[in-house]
Image (cartoon, rainbow, N blue to C red):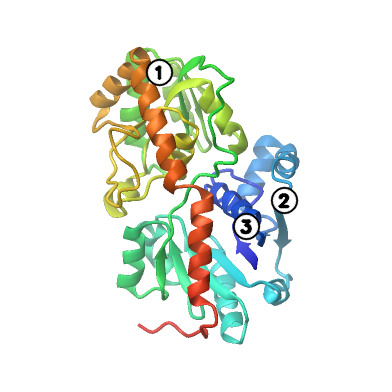
């Protein structure tokens, strides 16, 4: 089959976590004998910001790292009907322009022979509800929601039909242990500062424990205001800026542990959804400590696959334990790695998607009914 993915960007992962999962999912589908390509806006904000920060080289590096992944840039004059004509499945990410979301649904209703899915990997359904409520999902065969809580949100609101829980996962062809590299530093954290969605949490679980323990650590990510960079510096942490996702496994290997700090909307309103960074970290076999989140879907085994810190004091204690008890770190790293490989790889999600497509094939497109 031929899969077409409308995404904000395949090439750029600057503040755009969906690119991580999409790359792995496309490669998993290709490994199973299917075709997959992406369609991205020509001047998307993620790629524009990446070019400003890192120059044109990251795009060439992407092509060198992922030679099997191909994409089309589209602009106002692009023929979307022609682009979808040969596709068996079209998957539209929630960052896609609302007018294009509507257009693709109409193409399906007009007799398009492709299955059409809407893919939501964000918290806008709760943090910016009107934006999701305003999308026209008529003609879409289903919705892929990256957590059961989000799926229930769609069902309760009457957004779309045949809503499926479709968690993100790790691309284990890329995210894997690098045993040839010995840890040199204590802490590495990879994550973006964002829109004040976890500012307090980053101070409590990252900055203050690091300062108290005098950790040798580095923080990678984007959208860090000057006050945040100054706080990192006062804590003794280096700010490394943007890091290409393909370089993260080596960054993990160079450090003794990492942490997971979920954004507030997930903790309060969308339980059961970790960031994709958690899947990727565990796939790399690095010990991980997590700030509170409710793993209500049982994705992992807290306390075995990762350590849990309910507050900043416990985070400090967990960090201290990993510094002084290497056997503890080795045990949780091994357990987390095994869990990801058993259930949370892009290959698992590709199998799930193919099963879903098999159930929906030959069903006519219908309009959403409230």
Q: Quadrant of residue 201?
A: top left
Determine whether 178 is above or below 280 in the image. Answer: above
For the residue labelled by badge 3, is the local secondary structure a helix, a strand or a loop?
loop
The 10 Å Cα crowd at callout 1, few under 14, some 14 to 19, many 20 or more, is many
Which residue has dot 2 on it? 68
Quarter occupied by the N terminus: bottom right
Residue 328 spot, x, y in % from top left: 33, 21
Which residue has dot 1 on it? 235
The 10 Å Cα crowd at callout 3, few under 14, some 14 to 19, many 20 or more, is few
**Earlier along the polypeptide chain: callout 3 or callout 1?**
3
Quarter occupied by the C terminus: bottom left
For the residue labelled by badge 2, is the local secondary structure a helix, a strand or a loop?
loop
Marks 3/1: CA–CA distance: 47 Å
Residue at the (70%, 76%) spot, across then down: 85
Determine whether 26 is above or below 340 in the image. Answer: below
The 10 Å Cα crowd at callout 2, few under 14, some 14 to 19, many 20 or more, is some
From the image, state whether disc 3 or disc 1 is nearer to you: 3
Q: Quadrant of residue 248?
A: top right
**Earlier along the polypeptide chain: callout 3 or callout 2?**
3
Q: Answer yes or no: is residue 211 visible.
A: yes
Residue 195 spot, x, y in % from top left: 43, 44
Determine whether 116 is above or below 227 in the image. Answer: below
Name the one closer to the observer, 351 or 58. 351
Residue at the (36%, 32%) spot, across then down: 202
Residue 37 spot, x, y in % from top left: 68, 60
Which residue has dot 3 on it? 32
Residue at the (27%, 31%) spot, across then down: 309
Determine whether 211 is above or below 59 in the image. Answer: above
Badges 3 and 2: C-beta atoms under 8 Å apart? no
Badges 1 and 2: C-beta atoms under 8 Å apart? no
**Earlier along the polypeptide chain: callout 1 or callout 2?**
2
């Amino acid at each position: 089959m031929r899969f077409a993915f409308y995404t904000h960007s395949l090439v750029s992962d600057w503040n755009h976590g969906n690119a991580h999962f999409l790359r792995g999912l496309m490669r998993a589908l290709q490994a199973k004998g299917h075709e997959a390509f992406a369609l991205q806006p020509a001047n998307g904000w993620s790629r524009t910001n990446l070019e400003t920060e890192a120059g044109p080289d990251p795009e060439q590096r992407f092509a060198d790292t992922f030679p099997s992944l191909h994409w089309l840039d589209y602009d106002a004059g692009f023929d979307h009907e022609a682009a979808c004509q040969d596709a068996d499945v079209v998957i539209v990410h929630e960052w896609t322009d609302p007018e294009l979301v509507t257009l693709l649904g109409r193409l399906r209703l007009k007799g398009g022979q492709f299955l059409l899915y809407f893919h939501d990997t964000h918290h806008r359904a709760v943090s910016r509800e009107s934006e999701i409520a305003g999308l026209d999902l008529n003609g879409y065969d289903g919705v892929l929601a990256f957590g059961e809580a989000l799926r229930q949100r769609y069902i309760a609101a009457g957004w779309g039909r045949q809503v499926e829980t479709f968690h993100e996962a790790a691309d284990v062809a890329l995210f894997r242990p690098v045993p040839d590299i010995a840890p040199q530093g204590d802490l590495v954290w990879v994550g973006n500062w964002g829109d004040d969605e976890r500012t307090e949490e980053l101070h409590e679980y990252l900055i203050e424990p690091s300062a108290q323990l005098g950790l040798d650590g580095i923080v990678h990510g984007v959208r860090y205001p000057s006050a945040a960079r100054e706080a990192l510096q006062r804590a003794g942490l280096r700010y490394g800026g943007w890091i290409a996702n393909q370089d993260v496994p080596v960054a993990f290997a160079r450090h003794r542990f990492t942490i997971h700090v979920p954004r507030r909307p997930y903790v309060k309103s969308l339980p059961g959804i970790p960031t994709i960074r958690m899947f990727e970290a565990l796939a790399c076999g690095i010990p991980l400590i997590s700030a509170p989140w409710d793993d209500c879907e049982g994705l992992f085994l807290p306390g075995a696959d990762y350590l849990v810190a309910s507050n900043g004091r416990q985070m400090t204690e967990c960090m201290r334990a990993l510094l002084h008890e290497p056997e503890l770190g080795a045990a949780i790293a091994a357990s987390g790695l095994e869990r990801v490989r058993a259930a949370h790889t892009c290959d698992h999600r590709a199998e799930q998607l193919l099963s879903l497509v098999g159930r929906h094939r030959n069903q006519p497109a219908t309009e959403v009914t409230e």
